[in-house]
Image (tube, rainbow, N blue to C red):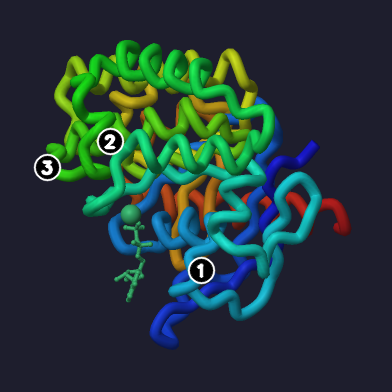
């Protein structure tokens, strides 16, 4: 089944088109990595999938489990099982991590919500992520370092138990040890729950832990090239510009092959 299907999506902000006729399909168990230069629209894509109302869908459709979700609110998408680990998680004063997560989980589980189970799950996730225990009872991300905020996003992922996991530059701000913990714990979650995943990263180091099934390069509002893990190596070596040229070349080759068919 397609956990996510994006069809000809065009998105704007402040009357500026960011994504144009964008297409993507993610199935359960697939790990897609989206790479591309800064300011190209990668974070925009994740926020639109999450339902951030600041972005305007000009045309196109977003389906989650084959249901159209274009007009569904952020909190409803979250309840359906869509999760975004943000590139720049903000701090929220006055709401503790524990309160936030307990509310989110109890809304989902209703009368089946078990406080003991919930506390046990949080404890185990906090231990796994090697987080400081008192962080649970602090305001969300309040006084957290960049790396701690990233770990806190993964903590939320563990507790909210999504089936579509999007992680936007989750590796930025992490020291080597924290990167290992985050990479390995995301992989553990993946093996246990088989979600569809969309990762955004600039670096191969995260992919030492999380092995992608698909690698996409985005440029000018759409995916211009899709490949496997070897594409990451190519980008690290040659940058994005040459990849683009190669794409044009490969279109050229296809066009020639097509032409030969009719000659
Ligand atoms: P990426 O994640 O690929 O680096 P973004 O998706 O964050 O890029 O941004 C894509 C473009 O959209 C950039 O030019 C950025 O300045 C613009 N943009 C994103 N969010 C906003 C916003 N809230 N207001 C105005 N412009 C925005
Ligand atoms: Mg970004």
> Looking at this view, is 64 or 239 the one in front?
64
Give x and y (percent) for residue 240: 35, 49
Numbered label attached to residue 159: none
Tell me if 201 is positioned left or right of 68 in this view: left
Residue placed at 66% from the left, 77% from the top?
59
Q: On the rendering, which quadrant does ligand 2 occupy? A: bottom left
Whole-angstrom CA distance, mark 3 to mark 1, is 34 Å
Instruction: Name the residue that disc number 2 marks.
Output: 150
Q: Sequence-wise, which precedes: disc 2 or disc 3?
A: 3
Tell me if 43 is positioned left or right of 93 in this view: right
Give x and y (percent) for residue 214: 56, 34
Q: Does the rendering let one see residue 209?
A: no
Quarter of the image with the C terminus is bottom right
Give x and y (percent) for residue 209: 38, 17
Instruction: Name the residue that disc number 3 marks.
Output: 143
Instruction: Name the residue that disc number 1 marks.
Output: 19
């Amino acid at each position: 089944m397609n956990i996510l299907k994006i069809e000809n999506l065009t998105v704007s902000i402040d009357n500026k088109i960011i994504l144009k006729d964008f297409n993507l399909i993610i199935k359960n168990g697939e790990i897609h990595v989206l790479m591309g230069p800064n300011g190209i629209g990668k974070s925009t894509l994740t926020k639109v999938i999450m339902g951030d109302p600041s972005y305007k869908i000009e045309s196109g459709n977003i389906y989650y489990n084959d249901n159209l979700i274009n007009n569904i609110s952020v909190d409803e998408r979250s309840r359906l099982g869509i999760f975004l680990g943000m590139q720049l998680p903000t701090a929220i004063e006055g709401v503790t991590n524990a309160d936030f997560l307990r509310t989110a989980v109890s809304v989902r589980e209703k009368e089946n919500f078990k406080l003991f189970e919930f506390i046990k799950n949080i404890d185990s996730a906090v231990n796994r992520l090697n987080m400081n225990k008192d962080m649970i009872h602090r305001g969300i991300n309040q006084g957290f370092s960049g790396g701690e905020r990233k770990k806190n996003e993964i903590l939320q992922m563990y507790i909210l138990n999504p089936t579509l996991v999007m992680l936007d530059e989750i590796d930025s701000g992490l020291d080597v040890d924290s990167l290992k913990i985050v990479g390995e714990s995301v992989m553990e979650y993946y093996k246990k729950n088989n979600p569809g995943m969309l990762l955004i990263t600039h670096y191969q180091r995260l992919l030492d832990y999380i092995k992608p099934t698909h690698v996409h390069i985005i440029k000018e509002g759409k995916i211009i090239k899709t490949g496997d893990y070897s594409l990451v190596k190519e980008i690290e070596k040659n940058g994005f510009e040459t990849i683009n040229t190669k794409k044009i070349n490969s279109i050229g080759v296809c066009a020639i092959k097509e032409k030969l068919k009719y000659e």
